[in-house]
Image (cartoon, coloured by chain):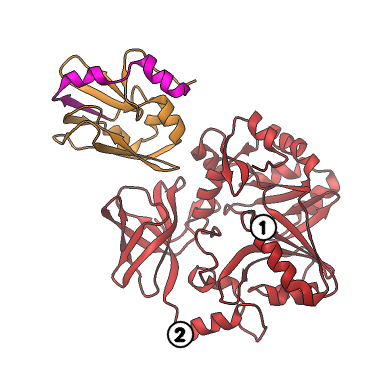
Chain colours: A red, B orange
Amino acid sequence: MRHTPLYDAHIAAGARMVDFGGWEMPINYGSQLDEHHQVRQHAGMFDVSHMTVVDINGNRTREFLSTLLANDVARLKVPGKALYSCMLNRRGGVIDDLITYFMDEQWFRLVVNAATRDKDLAWLERQAERYDVTITEHPELAMIAVQGPEARARVLALLPENDAAVAGALTPFSAAVLGELFIARTGYTGEDGFEITLPAEEAEPFWNRLLQAGVAPCGLGARDTLRLEAGMNLYGQDMDEEQSPLESGLAWTVAMKDERPFIGRAALEDQMSDGLKHKLVGLVLEGRGVLRSHQQVFTAQGEGETTSGGFSPSLQKAIAFARIPVEAEGSCEVEIRGKRIAARIVRPPFVRNGKACEGIL
Amino acid sequence: MSDIPSELLYRESHEWVRDEGDGTVVVGISDHAQDALGDMVFVELPEPGMSYEQGDACAVVESVKAASDIYAPLDGEVVESNAALEDSPELVNSDPYGDGWLFRYIPSNPSQLEGLLSPEAYAELQDD
């Protein structure tokens, strides 16, 4: 199995390690619930070095990304600005979801999922042929996500004064290069914070300084409940190559207003003219039990299935995402170990900035 | 190394059994089991009056990770389940042999106690 540059730090911190797409990663360092609450209430950090950083360089980079991505890179006007998007196949299925950072017209940075690395790179190479751009993966970089209401302050306190001023001035969903650090005000938890990309050899010292500053190490377990509460999809679970972003709660990331051609657009237009059959919604369990992925959902308009589920530590209730018939709303039932338990259909997110969202409780 | 109290008997599926000496036994899950499962978030217990045969699935503990069946260590009838777990499933983690007990029942075939694992045998099982 592959190890990130922080592997030794995880072992030293008593992490329980699991196989995550071929990477040996921490699932927790003791209590997943405590780690979840640390991020919602204070500050926690995650090793996300397994994620793949890919730089696209060349004069036609923007033009290339404009056809590659379902969201429109024309929205990226200010250097440093980030955009969340799906990369679709020609059938309108999701090859991966990713973040694009616009640094300058010659340099855009993509961060893609670890589990989809190989197919993503192959797809990028193939689509880039006509554009004379270079595609460079950066396996020598590590990435640490520091998240929570106190996260930014803890990170800024560790930076030299000038760098702290720049990083402190970053608006949400933007990034800056500070010497060897690439620092972005982004995350996957629904809390404020930074995602910091840095050379592999700098990762452990930086991690240890964060540790000394009181930032709690958090594993993939807490990362999953945090992103679920925050209403953020997980690739491979909530959407994949067989699912359209329009039926995965990701219509807001698909820019179709103008005529811009992009891969998968024709298929999405066909789906829209045929009428969408399903939608991805949030569920809150009313009865007792825990929602998990792949449970059957019964609505008055037909059946569906949960795609992600779990116990929400912030809400103290079971929550899930489910793909259900597009007309269904109000209440439904979920089959849990042979019994049908009542649930409420809601619109994610469930939790933002430490608080339950409107209409969730 | 997990805690394995010497006064209890165990099952391979990680339940413990305490003979109360009044014709009832109390059942819970071992320290090793709670540690492997992770933070508990939901426990479903049998109602008093329910009867089970040894090996029947009779309760469910759900951690952040997964749901796990609890198997009846003996034939018998449930007389009480631990109501505190409804609101505080984390007691199974914090005190698996005390406040985190699951249910109490009357064994209908007490000789089955002899077939359970001794603390030493259960410890050996974990070493494998």
Q: State if disc 2 and disc 1 touch (CB < 8 Å).
A: no
Q: Is residue B56 magenta?
A: no
Q: Are marks 1 and 2 on the same chain?
A: yes
Residue drawn at the location 36% of the way across and 16% of the way down: B119
Residue A30 position, x and y percent, is 53, 32
SS of the residue at dot 2?
helix
Residue drawn at the location 37% of the way across and 48% of the way down: A290
Residue B50 position, x and y percent, is 15, 36
Q: Chain of mark 1?
A: A
**Of discs 1 and 2, which sits in the foreground?**
1
Q: Of the residues under marks 1 and 2, which one precedes in the sequence?
A: 1
Distance Cα–Cα, label 1 vs label 2:
33 Å
Instruction: Give left or right: position of A144 versus A270.
Output: right
Residue B5 in view here:
no
SS of the residue at dot 1?
helix
Q: Which residue is mark 1?
A: A117
Task: Please name whichever residue, A234 or A114, is drawn nearer the observer in this view of the structure.
Answer: A114
Disc 1 marks a residue whose amino acid type is: Arg
Residue A176 position, x and y percent, is 79, 57
Q: Which residue is mark 2?
A: A274
Dot 1 surroundings within 10 Å: few (below 14), some, or many (20 or more)?
many
Residue drawn at the location 22% of the way across and 30% of the way down: B54
Q: Chain of mark 2?
A: A
Q: Which mark is residue A318?
A: none
State which region is magenta.
Answer: B103-128
Instruction: Give left or right: position of A216 versus A352.
Output: right
Disc 2 marks a residue whose amino acid type is: Asp
Q: Is residue B126 magenta?
A: yes
Q: Is residue A2 above or below residue A340?
A: above
Dot 2 surroundings within 10 Å: few (below 14), some, or many (20 or more)?
few
- Choose top left, top right, bottom left or bottom right for residue A52: bottom right
